[in-house]
Amino acid sequence: MRIGVKLPHTGDAVPAPSVARRARDLELAGFDSLWVSDHVVMPNVIESRYPFAADGKATWPTATPYLEALVSLAAAAAVTERVRLGTAALVLPQRNPVLLAKQVASIDALSGGRVALGIGAGWLREEFDALGVPFEARGARMEEWIELLRDCWTGRPAAHSTGRYVLPEDTLVLPTPAHAVPLYVGGHSPTALRRAARLGDGWLAQQAVTALDPERLAGEIASIRSTAADAGRDPRTLQVVLRLVESSGRAAEVARRITELAQAGVNEIIVDVDPVDGDAQADHDLLRDAADAR
């Protein structure tokens, strides 16, 4: 199992020029991957239902600043050599697909082929409204954008014309990525699971450490793999990445559950390390030992 970590690029990490230093430190601690989250704007008061909480309530202050996800990955790419660099998760329908393809290909080329893109349809209507993007059509936009991303990453995308996007013929999108950038489709709704099975290179899941449920994960993973097989895809090629929120300071608790997560079908976990009082090296070593011992 790979051990990934959230790169601190929000909240208290924003005022200080610390993202690059923290990226270096987390790589030196031994983590396999660094991941960033994504919000372009936030409303003062959230009215939308947050899908990752039982009561539908978001759990962080809306005034939390976010350094932009791809800018943060570029900063990390410039100072690291080995770790994979990912988004968990980028709200795909909010982005211009051709510009996003260019940005991701550039970071991938600069990093020597280390980018992975976790993508989601989004849940925050207020953010879509602020960006001038229709909220109701986000699922259809996401599926179309996946097609456009992969086509643009060939460097010579085909002409594309729908009611949502028009790409003229003979458009060149260069450079191409240094490797085939994997797309991990996020979400736990039945629609999201089917989308991951049909279109993704894997699934990006999320659970809180305080409510960890490997049995539920196993059922969702089995559903994805069954749907992928029905669609003529090889389910063994699909990777499962699990974002573990509320994991800061709980490395020992996560380590005790790693065998259960692996048995459920999880290939990689993403944890938090306290950027102020945490010990990244100790947390990594504890998790790595648990993963290797299973």
Image: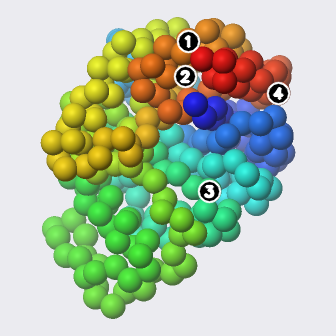
Rendering coords of residue 131 (x, y %): 39, 53
The answer to which quarter of the image holds residue 121 is top left
Residue assigned mark 2: 245
Front residue of 188/84: it is 84
Amino acid under disc 4:
Gln
Q: Can residue 19 be seen? A: yes
Would you call the spot at circle 2 few (<14 residues within 10 Å), some (14-19), or many (20 or more)?
Answer: some
Residue 125 versus residue 174 in the image, above or below: above
Residue 96 versus residue 236 in the image, above or below: below
Contact flag, marks 2 and 4 (Cβ < 8 Å): no
Rendering coords of residue 272 (x, y %): 65, 26
Amino acid under disc 2:
Val
Amino acid under disc 3:
Arg
Name the residue located 67 percent from the left edge and 58 percent from the top edge: 74
Would you call the spot at circle 3 few (<14 residues within 10 Å), some (14-19), or many (20 or more)?
Answer: many
Q: Residue furthest front?
A: 293
Residue assigned mark 4: 281
The answer to which quarter of the image holds residue 227 is top left
Residue assigned mark 3: 114
Determine the secondary structure under disc 1.
helix
Determine the secondary structure under disc 2.
strand
Name the residue located 55 percent from the left edge and 22 percent from the top edge: 245
Rendering coords of residue 46 (x, y %): 40, 28
Residue assigned mark 1: 257
